[in-house]
Amino acid sequence: MQEKISTSDTPNAKPRRSYTREFKARIIAECDAGDKSVAQVAMSHQINANLIHNWRRRMKQGGARQAMVPVALSAPAPSRCEGPGHIEVVLDTATVRFYGTVDSHNARTLLSVLR
């Protein structure tokens, strides 16, 4: 059973399928069980085997989207850019701004969590 969560609104266009995380996890678990190949699992669910390979790769890398992690700040960020150091990173739905002197280790850690 496919679990679609969105389709295209364009007339005469083939709908783009999206799948829930739970569905992807079930498919990957079915592949990892070892009694069927990825191609067999893909055919039984009418999806492309390359899609399953992509899901498995992303899951091994920690997933495309991870849960939010609390971050403790030592000082409140200024309301506007003051001084020479200003870095702004825009992600899907988040914007991270660094002001002043940026500790590269802390910045790298924070960005790796958000990636």
Image: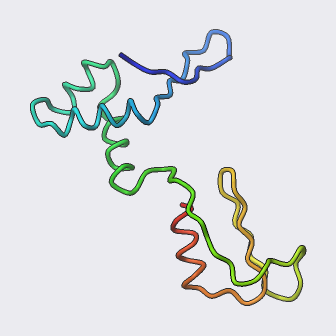
The residue shown at (68%, 86%) is 102
Q: Please indicate whether residue 96 sits to the left or right of residue 108 in the image.
A: right
For residue 43, which quarter of the picture?
top left
Viewer-closest of 101 and 13: 101
Q: Residue at x 66, y 57 (%)?
A: 91
- The answer to whether residue 110 is above or below residue 14 is below
> Which is more toward the observer, 25 or 57?
25
Q: Is residue 36 above or below residue 71?
A: above
Q: Position of residue 69 (x, y in %)?
A: 56, 62
Q: Nearer the viewer, residue 38 or 108?
A: 108
Instruction: Determine whether, in the image, residue 74 is placed left or right of residue 2.
Output: right
Where residue 42 sits in the image (x, y, percent)? 27, 26
On the image, which quarter does residue 85 sit in? bottom right
Residue 104 in the image, given as x and y percentages of width and height: 59, 85
Q: Residue at x 31, y 32 (%)?
A: 26
Residue at point 68%, 17% (across, down): 9
In the picture, measured across the screen, residue 80 lies left or right of residue 26, that is right
Q: Is residue 15 above or below residue 55?
A: above
Rendering coords of residue 112 (x, y %): 51, 68
